[in-house]
Image (cartoon, rainbow, N blue to C red):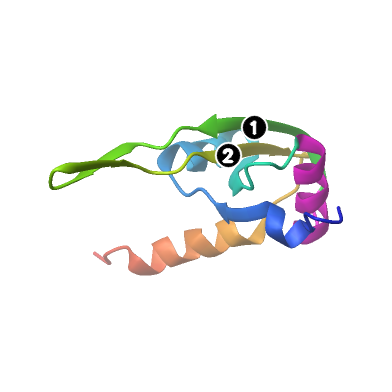
Amino acid sequence: MSAKDIYSILRRPVVTEKAALLKEDNNQVVLRVRADANKIEIRKAVEQLMGVSVTNVNTSIQRGKKKRLGRTIGKKSNWKKAVVTLAAGETVEFYEALESLDELEAPQE
């Protein structure tokens, strides 16, 4: 990984309702990755940076949406999504941190 080091492959986690359901049901993590990264590079980057073992990686290209600003119509750039399946019993810390933030922000009754 000379031109693409492991720190540039993983961009950010995708935090949506569907991603949360995948995490709970299938022990899968959804990440936004570099557009030119392949499955082997994504697997190595996740295993090294997050310290977990990966069993499967699925990728897809998400097409950019058309946006309008006044008269002009623009388009957001395309991006690559990776759904990483973790081994049984493995967890990633940033999702647990997000869950603890949700508990803090929840209204107390």
How far across and down, in percent of the image, does residue 34 sit? 64, 47
Q: Secondary structure at mark 1?
A: strand
Badge number at residue 80: 2
Q: Tags 2 and 1 in contact by the CB under 8 Å rule?
A: yes
Q: Residue at x 58, y 39 (%)?
A: 80
Q: Residue furthest front?
A: 72
Q: Is residue 51 left or right of residue 35?
A: right
Reply above or below: 55 against 105: above
Q: Which residues are magenta?
A: 39-52
Front residue of 98/36: it is 36
Front residue of 37/98: it is 37
Indicate whether residue 64 is drawn in magenta: no
Q: Secondary structure at mark 2?
A: strand
Q: Which quarter of the figure has residue 30?
A: top right
How far across and down, in percent of the image, does residue 48 sit? 83, 57
Badge number at residue 59: 1
**Looking at the image, is mark 2 or mark 1 earlier in the sequence?**
1
Q: Residues within 10 Å of mark 2 (few under 14, many from 20)?
A: some
How far across and down, in percent of the image, does residue 76 sit? 39, 44
Q: Is residue 83 left or right of residue 86?
A: left
Q: Amino acid at mark 2?
A: Lys
